[in-house]
Image (tube, coloured by chain):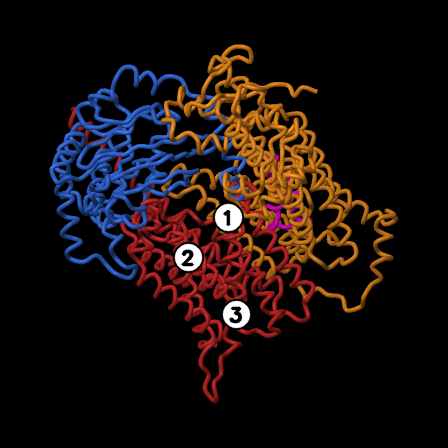
Chain colours: A red, B orange, C blue
Amino acid sequence: MIMGDFWILATASLVGVSTALVGVLLILRRMSLLGDAISHSVLLGIVLAYLISGSRSVIAMMIGATLIGLMTAWLSNSLHRLGKLQTDASIGIIFTWFFAMGVILISVYAGQVDLDQDCVLYGEITMVPFDMVIMGEKMLGPRALWLIGGVTLLNLLVVVVAFERFRLVSYHPLLALTLGVNVTFWHYLLMTLVSLTTVASFEAVGAILVVALLVIPASSAYLWARSLKQMMWAAVGYAQSAVLLGYALAAWLDLAIAAAIATLTGLQLLLTIAVMQWRQWWRRRVSFRDRDAYTR
Amino acid sequence: MTPDFERVDPDYWQLLVEFWSFSDTNATWVLIGAVLLGMSASVIGTFSFLRKRSLVGDVLAHSALPGVMVAFILSHSNQPLVMFAGALSSSMLGLLLMGWLPKNTKIKPDAAMAITLSFFFAMGLLALSYIQGLPIPGKSGLDKILFGQAAAMLPADLYLLSAVAVVVLVMVWVLFHKLRLVAFSPDYARTLGLPLVGYELTLALLIVSAVVIGLQLVGVVLMAAVLLTPIAAARFWHRQLTVMLGIASLIGALSGAISANISYMAPTMPTGPWMVVVLSMIFLVSFLFAPQRGLLSNLLRQRRFKKQVRAENLLRSFYLLNERRQQSKGNFLQASLNRVFSEEELLSHRPMPYGSLMKGLRELARNGYLVYARADKGWALTEWGAAVALELTRRHRLWETYLVTEAGLSPQDVHRQAEKMEHLLTAEEIERLAELLEQGPQSGKGVKDPHGRLIPLTEEPSS
Amino acid sequence: MAFPPLSVQQLSMRYQHNPVLTDVSFEIPCGQTVAILGPNGAGKSTLLKGMMGLVPLMSGRVRFFGDPLAKRQLSIAYVPQREESDWDFPINVMDVVLMGRHGRLRFWQRPTAEDRALATEALAEVKMLAFQDRQISELSGGQQQRVFLARALAQRASLYLMDEPFAGVDMTTERAMTDLFARLKAQDKTIVCVHHDLNTVEAYFDWVILINSRLVDAGPTSKVLTEDNLKKTYGGRLSLLNQMTEKMYRSNIDKVHDDA
């Protein structure tokens, strides 16, 4: 079982790394809600991939989910333009629709789809060690770990290679345009990464809790980070500690692991805010005291 | 939750008849509840849509989850009122956090929404997983509030739901004018001395109430759609708020009724997703097919306009060609009736594909603007066509004059724009223009446009 | 004959839900400081953004040095309005200025030592070198403006388009900017600013463009800045023109007319 714990932790930790990286870019681009929407709608992609391919094929799942994810971004943008609806309204309409269809398909094809509503909500991280990739005689580790490992590598690669571009585009998209940068391309690339990351995290944490991992560690880091690099490191750090503490909490009180991890990210945020508010208050007090001493 | 699927195929037709004959009291209550919920949620959702905060409902619904769970843990009962109080208070907490974060930290409003939503939801699931380990009865229905399950609702739940829904509707009816003002221009409302905070709070409370009563029927995850989608669809049908509210509540009611029906026929199905899919379909139909504002009607209008522009351009060509041939000072209109132009002449005046020229000419002839002179193998204006061609030319030249004299553009710049404007100017605008340029219908005979050409005066075709 | 740094032909634009400009045409000469003047909401910033391809044009043509924007992107530096920027972004002054070099870098490339040298030089020119490691949120309004200027300088452009660079800045910054304008002019660079302060126009700018719904006049400051022109610029709007331009947009006639 020790090995099982290890696999679970390793998977959760990689989920933390990749969601934190993508999440930083999301919140800097002010696109948290689109991230939320995509993580909901990928469910439809996953279910459709199951039904069409008839198997738990990773490739089909990735393609299905990414297509649906990009469609969410594209459709809500089109709806905003053609229907003259506010952006968040068009996002809301599209993702609730896709998600609802996903849930209905799961209930209708309950026998054929190896998914249920619980999995959508919590993920099935405790099942991770029971689904191993086996090659010949060797056990190569859990399938979910390979999946999220691959996506983490991809995220890292893209972020490292195109770091400067992402920084430019998220800092000032208009300026990027005047410098001749194709902002639309980078937008959809980011949306692709969000889709891939949420699919790969799906088995571990489900479709909804992944939003917490995308947005909250990045926001905690945003509060005090002084550079994009620092913000990314900090977000990854927050995510990792939330994974460890959340796992411990869940094991101790016998709770849902994914929910515990997500709750901890929120607590970290509140704690960070509290510390910062306290420091601000303290600094103001000190400066008042200094001024008082001076005037006296 | 278990994989919910019945292998025995029930007789759906039988169930359908049963449902709509209202013989099953419980099912009828579910129907009433669902309809009332759909109505109240869509009506109150309209106001958050107007305040450009369409996704607030999403945040509030997710925030209700931990409240329900904590209320259960504390009271060990699933009394509807207890659950309602728990959900209400935790939704309000969520609302507070969502508003507090962007005001007091660097966190932006959209991120604050995503944070609140996911954090509260995570806490709710955490508490739910804790409850599932507790040896208390009555916990089995709790997870139904995630996706909603109408069939699992008890009469007591439905009474409360209906009562609250009616209260919400009545409140909106009573406060309608104030809520509209606050939604439309909050700052102005403040200058009128209205207690803005009070109204905002009332609005928030109404939204939260609608969300909370929807939890068992629609579920936490998809409640946002019931608030948002009806009004978004209603917007395509009408622009007046009162009418929009009526349409939205109708859409809400319809989706409620349909999903109650589905829930009766397949009791283990989650109700919320069905309601949302029904709503999305209604939205899609509205978006595509609504008269005037729908996508299809826009495309059709565009096509009609294109035809009109082509026809008007041709008539203008006729006018200009006629002008070229006009020698003496005779009656222009009368003279133009006898002049025949070949297709080649027209093409050399305004190059365009031959096919579309013929299409345009035939259409003009069909509508009585042109006649085909078989003997001369060409086309001539009718009296009516000549009058319209003259009017178009008048518009064109008046606009050119306006651009040069009033806007100070140079004469060589104005033709291109006037070429387009001539299709858009109405008689009323032309009158205004003529007055502006001090050439009323009587005065100013023989006024020239910037290119030195005569601006024709409108004449009634003599008939 | 050399092409003018900027020429605009029959440009029409709208902003939010209203048409702001109809059929504007002008050219500006090389090596001058040019002010775009007009009443509030006349579309000064919109004109600048439209020329830079940031908001769609209804119709018209813009040429930089005789070429479309895409061909000359690197020779044109745009300085956005200060308020339109995200000052909470976790980034320091040096990195902001280095962004000016990004038009020349492929997406995987990092700024080189040469880019850094150029950025340093640019910062020194606006007297902000001491602040290079500062977080941008810690700067005053004038300092933020100077950072944006430095970024444009680092771009090594020949034409600078600035959106309200003098709005809400302190005396030091104003001085630094006018000095800089003089130096840039000496290098035959052209500067176009959206400007709002009539009192300083004559002192800072050689050339003015007056707009109000349409082009009122464009030319050397001494010739164009007349009372009559100012009355036209700041006087009433041409409501019929605005109304018809809006109708033109809504009816989509540009497309229809060309297809028909």
Q: Chain of mark 2?
A: A
**Is residue B206 rendered magenta in the image?**
yes
Q: Which residues are magenta?
A: B205-231
**Residue A190 got which mark?**
2
**Looking at the rendering, which quadrant does residue A45 occupy?**
bottom right
Residue type, mark 1 in image? Asn
Outermost bottom residue: A137
Count residues near mark 3 (Cα–Cα under 10 Å), then give few for <14, some for 14-19, many for 20+: some
Residue type, mark 2 in image? Leu
> Is residue B123 visible in the rendered structure shown here?
no
Q: Are marks 3 and 1 on the same chain?
A: yes
Q: Measured from the top left, where is residue B393 in percent x and y?
A: 53, 27
Q: Chain of mark 1?
A: A
Quadrant into which the C terminus of chain B falls:
top right
- Marks 3,1: beta carbons within 8 A: no
Q: Measured from the top left, where is residue B31 in percent x and y?
A: 77, 45
Foreground: disc 2 or disc 1: 1
Q: Chain of mark 3?
A: A
Report whether C110 appears left or right of A89: left
Quadrant into which the N terminus of chain B falls:
bottom right
**Looking at the rendering, which quadrant does residue C189 occupy?**
top left
| Residues at marks 3 and 1, CA–CA distance in whole angstroms | 37 Å
Foreground: disc 3 or disc 1: 1
Look at the numbered disc 2 and give the secondary structure of its residue: helix
Look at the numbered disc 3 and give the secondary structure of its residue: helix
Q: Measured from the top left, where is residue A91 in percent x and y?
A: 53, 48
Residue type, mark 3 in image? Thr
**Residue A126 got which mark?**
3
B150 up-or-down from A256: above or below: above
Report whether A145 appears left or right of B62: left
Tag 1 residue: A77
- Nearest to N terminus: mark 3 or mark 1: 1
